Image: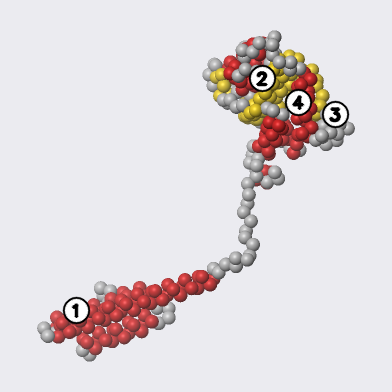
Amino acid sequence: MSMKENLEQIRSEALAAIAADGADLEALRVKYLGKKGELTAVLRGMGQLTPEERPVVGQIANEVRADIEAAMTARKETLAAEALERRLKEEKLDVTMPGTAAKMGHVHPLNLVQRDLEDIFIGLGFSIEEGPEVEYDYYNFQALNIPEEHPARDTQDTFYITEKMLLRTQTSSVQARVMENKKPPIRIISPGRVYRSDAMDATHSPLFHQLEGLVIDKGITMGDLRGTLDTFAKQEFGSDTRIRFRPHHFPFTEPSAEVDISCFVCGGKGCRLCKNEGWIEILGAGMVHPHVLEMGGIDPTVYSGFAFGLGVERIAMLKYHIDDIRHLYENDVRFLSQF
């Protein structure tokens, strides 16, 4: 068989193999066009041809190579188009079908309660003030009438950073700063995180949240305090809620009181939540101590005021019947999804 015939045979065999179903195009490329392929093997014999025959055979060889490469390219494009068509049919979407519901996040119960409290007091004319969590000893203690020998300064209860700096133990430090920088009338709340060296258990945490309020103006009385807290309790726990004051002592208020609300579950009759007492303690309050006013640069003979403070975690636990404060910090999705 002549070299021309060999080339024509290679062309016809290659084109037939390429067009066949299931053809391995890469294997066929190697078989016919590779360095050890059939076309290369034939071309190695060109040295035996006469000078007149070489150009003719070379041209035929180039045509054979070009035809095989073109057939492979066309077959690849055909196979790719067929694969795309199959994929489009398999992945066809029914746009009338309902989509998969996206899992939505939930506002944390502490944030829910804090927003509630802020909304109530903003509605009563209070504004929100914030202050640093890393605080000076002066604003956290001295300006609030807490002398150096007071138990609240004990290093077992307070996270000291230096001798004069600490993680604030109460948001009352914001009140001290406000009195120093603003003149009456003052009507503010100061929500935020506070820190105390407590062991973690069902009712204690070294980090928790407070919201404290301060009102200073001429003629402010204990009756104003009671009216404000009575309105707050009714809005937060229900219109039938009652409050009561019990005498207490806080260094920065005089007189001072612990404030209870009537149990919003049993209405004061006695139940498990209120430990059958009918009342639940929720906050501390009192009239701002004259010395605290003086430390803030306010004349106590002209102005008077009241202050109160409550724990956001305590309100959340009461409102949502949570029996362990640790649930609020463990980020268990099963717990948080209830809110």
N-terminal label among 3 and 2: 2
Disc sitting over residue 277 in the figure:
3
N-terminal label among 4 and 1: 1
Q: Distance between the Cα atoms at labels 3 and 4?
A: 24 Å
Callouts 4 and 1 close, C-beta under 8 Å: no
Residue at coordinates 63% horizontally, 21% vertically from top-left? 175
Query: What SS does tag 1 mark?
Result: helix
Residue that numbered label 1 is attached to: 44
Judged by depth in the image, the label closer to the viewer, 1 or 2, is 2
Disc sitting over residue 185 in the figure:
2
Which residue type does callout 1 highlight? Arg
N-terminal label among 3 and 4: 4
Which residue type does callout 3 highlight? Glu
Q: Distance between the Cα atoms at labels 1 and 2?
A: 106 Å
Judged by depth in the image, the label closer to the viewer, 4 or 1, is 4
- Residue 139 in sight in this render: no
Judged by depth in the image, the label closer to the viewer, 3 or 4, is 4
Which quadrant of the rendered structure holds the N terminus?
bottom left
Residue at coordinates 21% horizontally, 86% vertically from top-left? 3
Q: Nearer the viewer, residue 2 or 228?
A: 228
Mark 2 crowd level (few <14, some 14–19, many ≥20, 10 Å Cα)? few
Residue that numbered label 4 is attached to: 228
Mark 4 crowd level (few <14, some 14–19, many ≥20, 10 Å Cα)? few
